[in-house]
């Protein structure tokens, strides 16, 4: 059995993401490299090397995951903000960070200056920022129109837009500029934001949709083109997705709306859409538009929809996220496990396939093809060169008292190491190394396997 050592650089991601909803779980991380997919393996054929360890997450529930420009991974948990450097966690909470209104962290977003903005459970106490090693709390005393921040979207110029209970706000260079109904907003409660390629800001309020361009607001809801007042979030706090042609796509209660050059078109199940409940909209590297719905996967191409049924099981057919790997395969988060969609076929990976739990909430694929997935109580796993490696907070590493057994190239060490092998017909067999002794700790047998 091979034991690999890893440096912090090996474990860090190279892409950024902003995820906006709660993940009531521990983190399962999978890394999938291009060389692995070149072999066209089934995802059930990878060797599963699993490290099960209490490696410093303050709590087994993460509501958000972000990688900042400096390479750190940040996890929003119910008992603090955890920063991961590839080897260990550093935890920031109310006990050691006065600028955090609460230890229960709800959401994270990085702006283009490298500032990390932090929303906590105390939603009416402002928003915190971590910048250049310093935490700062921003409230109405600093210029926010409301202490309740509902949404955020970073622009390319280093500023960041905030939706609040009392209007819209733009922060840049230490100053807030605020906008309300008196400036043309349809309503003061803003729940979703998005910037298009022309730098138009699309704003969803409880009283309808508006567009902010060249310093002026245009109210769109109520017009013939935008008769619906409800626009769902389709990507984090975003209300729109722009395709390569410049067309904007929006999800409403009545269906999907496309908008281009002032003209809109509504698509429904009559046009081939799988469901009116749209969870995500994603454009692939080939330019195809994919829609994750409550009733399967839909693709829009050449003016029409094609529906793909992921499973006869309603839970597996409920798709909440879409991601694409370096080989062009789509990875899907479903109501029961994950799926990979390639060449018109779905492949499942669930609990019976030795997935840690069927309740998968989030997935992220970085620029190198690494896939990060958050599941219920599964730990941290990775696919790398055909190897599936798992970290968790169930056993093993402690946060601040690690006794050396195995040392990596940077001098980091592991208190306990658990290695698991997953084989197609035999399931998962895990052995834990502790005090220099190996012990069989866990087995997950596949149906028909040993």
Image: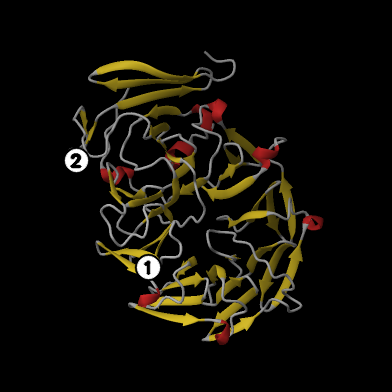
Quarter-of-image position of residue 173? bottom left
Depicted 395 relative to depicted 323: above or below: above
Residue beneath disc 2:
410
Nearest the viewer among 389 and 94 is 94
Residue sitting nearer the eye, 393 or 418: 393
Q: Can residue 342 be seen in this view?
A: yes
Circles 1 and 2 in contact, beta carbons < 8 Å: no
Q: Mark 1 points at which residue?
A: 112
10 Å crowding of disc 1: few (<14), some (14-19), many (20+) = some
Decide if residue 107 is on the left or right side of residue 260.
left
The residue furthest right is 270
Residue 225 vertical placement versus 69 (above, below): below
Quarter-wise, where is residue 435 in the image? top left
**Residue 132 image position (x, y, % from top left):** 25, 64
Toward the viewer: 169 or 407? Answer: 169
Residue 346 placement, left or right of 11: right
Q: Position of residue 253 (x, y in %)?
A: 72, 61
Instruction: Work out whether mark 1 precedes mark 2 in sequence or the reverse, and give the earlier one.
Output: 1
Left or right of residue 136, residue 371 in this image: right
x then y, percent, for residue 247: 63, 69
Identify the image's colour scheme: rainbow, by chain, secondary structure or one colour.
secondary structure
Q: Residue 46: where, in percent of width, then height?
A: 46, 29
């Amino acid at each position: 059995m091979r034991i690999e050592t890893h440096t912090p650089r090996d474990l860090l991601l190279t892409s950024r993401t902003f995820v906006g909803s709660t993940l009531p779980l521990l983190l399962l991380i999978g890394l999938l490299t291009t060389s692995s997919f070149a072999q066209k393996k089934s995802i059930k054929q990878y060797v599963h090397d699993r490290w099960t360890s209490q490696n410093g997450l303050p709590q087994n529930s993460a509501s958000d995951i972000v990688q900042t420009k400096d390479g750190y991974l940040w996890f929003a948990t119910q008992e603090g903000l955890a920063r991961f450097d590839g080897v260990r966690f550093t935890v920031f909470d109310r006990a050691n960070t006065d600028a955090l209104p609460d230890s229960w962290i709800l959401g994270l977003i990085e702006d283009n200056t490298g500032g990390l903005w932090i929303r906590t459970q105390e939603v009416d106490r402002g928003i915190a920022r971590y910048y250049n090693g310093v935490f700062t709390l921003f409230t109405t005393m600093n210029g926010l129109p409301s202490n309740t921040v509902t949404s955020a979207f970073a622009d390319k110029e280093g500023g960041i837009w905030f939706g609040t209970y009392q209007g819209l706000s733009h922060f840049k260079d230490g100053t807030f500029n605020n906008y309300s109904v008196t400036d043309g907003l349809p309503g003061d409660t803003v729940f979703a934001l998005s910037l298009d390629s022309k730098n138009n800001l699309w704003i969803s309020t409880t009283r309808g949709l508006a567009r902010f361009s060249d310093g002026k607001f245009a109210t769109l809801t109520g017009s013939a083109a935008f008769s619906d007042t409800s626009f769902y979030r389709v990507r984090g706090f975003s209300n729109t997705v722009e395709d390569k042609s410049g067309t904007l796509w929006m999800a409403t209660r009545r269906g999907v709306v496309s908008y281009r050059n002032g003209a809109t078109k509504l698509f429904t199940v009559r046009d081939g859409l799988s469901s009116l409940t749209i969870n995500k909209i994603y454009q692939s590297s080939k330019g195809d538009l994919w829609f994750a719905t409550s009733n399967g996967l839909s693709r829009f191409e050449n003016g029409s929809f094609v529906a793909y049924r992921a499973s006869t099981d309603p839970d597996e057919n409920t798709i909440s996220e879409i991601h694409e790997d370096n080989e062009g395969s789509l990875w899907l988060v479903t109501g029961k496990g994950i799926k990979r969609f390639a060449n018109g076929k779905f492949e499942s990976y669930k609990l019976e396939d030795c997935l840690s739990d069927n309740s998968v909430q989030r997935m992220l694929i970085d620029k190198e093809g690494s896939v990060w997935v958050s599941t219920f109580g599964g730990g941290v796993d990775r696919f790398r060169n055909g190897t599936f490696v798992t970290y968790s907070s169930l056993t093993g590493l402690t946060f601040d008292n690690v006794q050396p057994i195995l040392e990596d190239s940077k001098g980091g060490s592991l208190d306990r190491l658990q290695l698991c092998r997953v084989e197609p017909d035999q399931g998962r067999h895990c052995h834990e190394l502790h005090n220099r002794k190996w012990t069989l700790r866990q087995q997950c047998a596949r149906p028909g396997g040993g």
